[in-house]
Image (cartoon, rainbow, N blue to C red):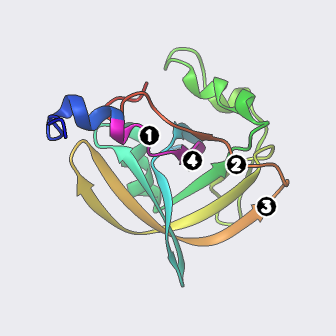
Amino acid sequence: MPTHDTTSLDAIGPALGRVSSGLFIVTTRDESAAPLGFLGSFVQQVALSPPTICVAIGADREHLTQVRREGRFGISVLGDEDKALMKPFFKGPDDGSPFDDVEHCAAPGGTPVLQDALAWLECRVSGEHDAGDHVVIFGVVEAGSLQGDAAPLTHTRKNGLRYS
């Protein structure tokens, strides 16, 4: 049996990239109550009762600061037919808010969610855990709606050590 280097990041990265995930728009509000969001893939249900979701947010991102301040976040689940909903969230900071280009509404607790997403969940922050360059935020799901019956949009990376 040939020997392979299985402990180097060069070996781990491509293998890790094959861990598939969904694609989501993670939302909260900023200090002025304006909607704030980003395209996220590090999202997972972690408990059944109470229903709990976790999302990993880059430790240096403004979104993390605002989720902590607001104490709430939303998850808009993208479906196979919802790829166009991602595009506004690739805007640069000088290009306006992505929410200028997508229909959104407030969930019962005030968190913005995308109206045309496959589903949405609104969560109350229940804890967090440092995970290196990200912070994992845990949230108890307090509201949600399934808005279609399409398959959820999933993706894999070429390398699990980079976003691309």
Identify which residue, 155 or 106, lies in the foreground.
155
Residue at image point 56% right, 23% down: 90
Indicate the amino acid at tag 3: Leu
Q: Which corner quadrant holds the C terminus?
A: top left
Q: Give the range drawn in magenta.
A: 15-27
Q: Which of marks 3 and 2 is in front?
A: 2
> Element type at marker 1?
loop
Tell me the distance, in whole angstroms, between the alpha carbons under discs 3 and 1: 27 Å
Identify which residue, 21 or 75, lies in the foreground.
21
Circle on res. 18: 1
Circle on res. 152: 2
Would you call the spot at circle 4 few (<14 residues within 10 Å), some (14-19), or many (20 or more)?
many
Tell me the distance, in whole angstroms, between the alpha carbons under discs 2 and 4: 18 Å
Identify which residue, 31 or 120, lies in the foreground.
120
**First-in-chain label (2 vs 1):** 1
Is residue 31 at all visible to an observer of this figure?
Answer: no
Q: Is residue 65 above or below residue 13?
A: below
Indicate the amino acid at tag 2: Pro
**First-in-chain label (4 vs 1):** 1
**First-in-chain label (3 vs 1):** 1
Residue occupied by mark 4: 27
Whether 18 is among the magenta residues is: yes
Tell me the distance, in whole angstroms, between the alpha carbons under discs 2 and 1: 17 Å
The location of residue 3, given as percent across then percent down, is 14, 36
Q: Nearer the viewer, mark 4 or mark 1?
A: 1
**First-in-chain label (3 vs 2):** 3
Q: Is residue 80 above or below residue 119?
A: above
Would you call the spot at circle 1 few (<14 residues within 10 Å), some (14-19), or many (20 or more)?
some
